[in-house]
Amino acid sequence: MSTKSKLTIISILTYCAFIILAFFTNILSPAKIGITWTIFWYIAAAGIIYYLWFKNLVFQRVMYYSKALHLTQTDLAKMLPNLKESQVVPDPAKRAIIAPIFNFPLQGLDILNAKLTPMAKQKGIKPFR
């Protein structure tokens, strides 16, 4: 099973768990908070789940290519312009199940992805699945 499929299944199950939890606890009941806020929170939760799915997919791709290219955390940091002190570049040598949510932005992952994908293609590394 590909990484994209695994992350999609996890995301769908997470959203279903949110819906079930909200339904059985009546925390988002239209009678309590109104139909507008109920709809808003269901859509907001779907948006958050989608964002995390996408960020984790890009993160896994970046880690796959950086490991295949034998890059270190320092090498990845050099590829990023304007890196803030509070941002911690992911370390390809350490196993990470999910993308860093708070201390590394999606924009940094996109930059790394854009740089690593052509490098991996030049070296003949199999495409990320």
Image: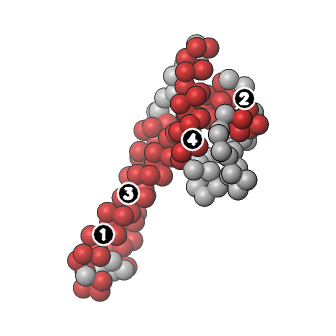
Image-based side of 30 in relation to 27, left or right: left
Alpha-carbon span between mark 3 and mark 4: 19 Å
Task: Name which residue type carries label 1.
Answer: Phe
Task: Name which residue type carries label 4.
Answer: Leu
Q: Earlier in the sequence, mark 2 or mark 3?
A: 3
Residue beneath label 1, please?
40
- Mark 1 residue element: helix
Q: Earlier in the sequence, mark 1 or mark 2?
A: 1
- Residue 70 in the image: state x and y as whole percent: 72, 25
Image-based side of 26 in relation to 106, left or right: left
Alpha-carbon span between mark 2 and mark 4: 15 Å
Q: Residue at x 72, y 35 (%)?
A: 78
Task: Name which residue type carries label 3.
Answer: Gly
Q: Are marks 1 and 4 in contact (CB under 8 Å)?
A: no
> Nearest the camera: 41 or 116?
116
Alpha-carbon span between mark 1 and mark 4: 28 Å
Picture disc at residue 47: 3
The answer to whether residue 93 is seen in the rendering is: no
- Mark 3 residue element: helix
Q: What is the image's colouring?
A: secondary structure
Residue beneath label 2, please?
71
Q: Earlier in the sequence, mark 1 or mark 4?
A: 1
Alpha-carbon span between mark 2 and mark 3: 32 Å
Q: Earlier in the sequence, mark 2 or mark 4?
A: 2
Badge 3 crowding class, 10 Å Cα cut-off, few under 14, some 14 to 19, many 20 or more, is few
Task: Name which residue type carries label 2.
Answer: Leu
Residue beneath label 4, please?
109
